Amino acid sequence: MKTLDTLEPSQVRDVWRLLGRINDPEIPVLTITDLGMVRSVHYREDGWHIGFTPTYSGCPATEFLLAAIREAMEAAGLRPVHIEQMLSPAWTTDWMTPAAKKRLRDYGISPPQGHACHSGAAVSVTCPRCGSPHTSLISEFGSTACKALYRCDSCREPFDYFKCI
């Protein structure tokens, strides 16, 4: 049986690519790898080990995503699969890729501004539609708990802001 030391790196890269096709059910333009939710991929004697961190510990999509990981791996003949939920350190928007933040903006959601370690600092939220920095908070919670609802003072359009977490 192959061990981590003898497994070809291309197989691990293939698993990362496979997992990179699993979309987040709440924001379908992003994948779980775009969001940084997949923390590790390893092969050991007892099978594939996937480290996974949900965006927050009570995320309602967690069970769906764990099942999607398992289904994708098994459909590709990569089994057995062991998924370890890694809650520490907690997920942060700092783990999102720059491409993910651009896709959020293109989708109409303002991406996180700044870094999670500065989450208490005042932040200027930019409108994803017109690019104006003149925006107003409508509600601390938008369509999901990880988003706030804003309105652009320039184009007057409402939009979600993906909060720094």
Image (tube, rainbow, N blue to C red):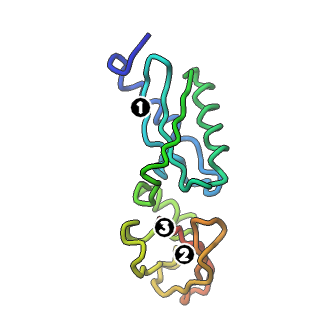
Q: Which residue is mark 1?
A: 13
Examine the rendered structure and indicate whether residue 40 appears above or below residue 111.
Answer: above
Amino acid at pointer 1: Arg
Dot 1 falls on a residue whose secondary structure is helix
- Give the percent coordinates (x, y) of residue 56: 55, 56
Amino acid at pointer 2: Arg
Residue positioned 66% across, 68% down in the render? 143
**Closer-to-camera residue (86/27):** 86
Examine the rendered structure and indicate whether residue 94 appears above or below residue 86.
Answer: below
Dot 3 falls on a residue whose secondary structure is loop
Amino acid at pointer 3: Pro
Which label sits on residue 129? 2
Pair 2/3: label in front: 3
Mark toward the start of the polypeptide (1 vs 2) = 1
For the image, the number of numbered tags is 3
Residue positioned 61% across, 77% down in the render? 149
Asked where in the image residue 155 lies, by quadrant, the reply is bottom right
Q: Is residue 59 left or right of residue 49?
A: right
